[in-house]
Amino acid sequence: MAEEVKLLKTWSSAFGLRVVWALKLKGIPYEAIDEDLSNKSALLLQYNPVHKKIPVLVHNGNPISESLVILEYIDETWKQNPILPQDPLHRARERFWAKFNDEKLLPSAWGAFTKEGKDREEAMAATMENLKFVEEELKGKKFFNGEKIGLVDLVFGWLANLISIFEEVTGFNIVGDGYPLLSAWMQEFSELPVIKDTWPPRDKMIIKYQALYDKYHPAK
Amino acid sequence: MAEEVKLLKTWSSAFGLRVVWALKLKGIPYEAIDEDLSNKSALLLQYNPVHKKIPVLVHNGNPISESLVILEYIDETWKQNPILPQDPLHRARERFWAKFNDEKLLPSAWGAFTKEGKDREEAMAATMENLKFVEEELKGKKFFNGEKIGLVDLVFGWLANLISIFEEVTGFNIVGDGYPLLSAWMQEFSELPVIKDTWPPRDKMIIKYQALYDKYHPAK
């Protein structure tokens, strides 16, 4: 049967990008449908009525939402170039860190970017604390899963892209010299061809994040 | 090899209970270690340094944290009485609803229980809206996964236990007659022997939740 694979995403979303990377790693051709989140398509509302969010993967007409759920689906559907290891304990560890990214690290960094005053300081401290766990997890490894990238690399991938944009827009130093293993990983990860080819253009990202920053921190 | 299975939990936590149910369904003997969350044990802090939360499953010395991660681990480690179906699309659907519970439904209900005024009204409206999705998902099914209970039943299990306690403590009507399929499921689910045997005592739960309610809504 001819496969029909569509991906509803945006040009810049970290949640969409991780799915793009997974499909590219597996070598699955797909049709990309870029959504305008300020004017959501009927397709997006039909396919993800609960969250009304991207990404949505549509495989032979069946929609799958929530990026971590999509990554597991992709790994179970197309077996080549596994994203998750075989061993249940290692799989649990990967899932743990993926959840950690989405529920702790990313929200803390977003807080540091959007909040003000004491709330911002707290969010920044939480981000630094969370990054320490990431640094610890990289000890003795090239990628989070060992020699090849896997689920955790895809999920932490936004760090390699966004942190330096956050730093440029806010003027804050986030990673700096304090996280040498993470810095090395960011370098390795961003040089992978599959990542390089799909990275959103830096100048466009700076414009987007500068506008967001100005929205959250209007001139007094 | 003799298996060593320990579970750090509390007597009342919904996140701990779903792991208890999974272990019982699989017929895995385990040692239960009840934590006092106001005075966390050295073991809990050692095994889950990131979140410092229960449940933690310790299998042959290896700790696994985060209840949804634990449920997947249990299903992959002990194959009998599967918690997840085989088909990738069905698996994705189960994972989607499990995440929906933890990230939308449970937080909205908790907000309805703990907040006041307009915030409470909003949380209550969100809870009702979220329960509509649950009701819809039960159409034509006895359990969420069909004829036998699976991941989504375990994750939504707290509804069958806590909703009536919330209702008794707050005086609010939450499920009432508006969700007939959910009401029928709550009945079916709570009558399963594995659930009945592990249900926390209702009188103790009422005392716990009354005290929590009084803490969040002190007399003016």
Image (cartoon, coloured by chain):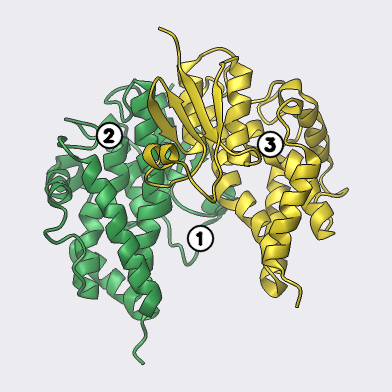
Chain colours: A yellow, B green
Question: Compared to B17, does B168 lie above or below?
Answer: below
Q: Quadrant of the C terminus of chain A?
A: bottom right
Q: Which residue is mark 1?
A: B40
Chain ID, mark 3: A
Disc 1 vs disc 2: which is toward the camera? 2
Q: Are marks 3 and 2 in contact (CB under 8 Å)?
A: no
Q: Residue at x 85, y 59 (%)?
A: A171
Q: Position of residue B143 (x, y in %)?
A: 19, 37
Using the rendered image, report if marks 3 and 2 lie on a common chain. Answer: no
Is residue B204 visible in the rendered structure shown here?
A: no
Q: Position of residue B43 (x, y in %)?
A: 53, 51
Residue B169 in the image: above or below residue B48? below
Provide the chain ID for the residue under circle 2: B
Residue A157 numbered tag: 3
As drawn, the label of residue A136 is none
Disc 3 crowd, CA 10 A, few/some/many (<14, 14-19, 20+): many
Residue B60 x, y percent position in the rendering = 48, 32
Q: Secondary structure at mark 2?
A: loop
Q: Which residue is label 2 attached to? A: B150
**In terms of image quadrants, where is residue A29?**
top right
- Residue drawn at (31%, 65%) of the image: B125
> Image quarter for residue B165?
bottom left
Is the residue at mark 3 from the same chain as the one at mark 1? no
Query: Secondary structure beneath disc 1?
Result: loop
Q: Chain of mark 1?
A: B
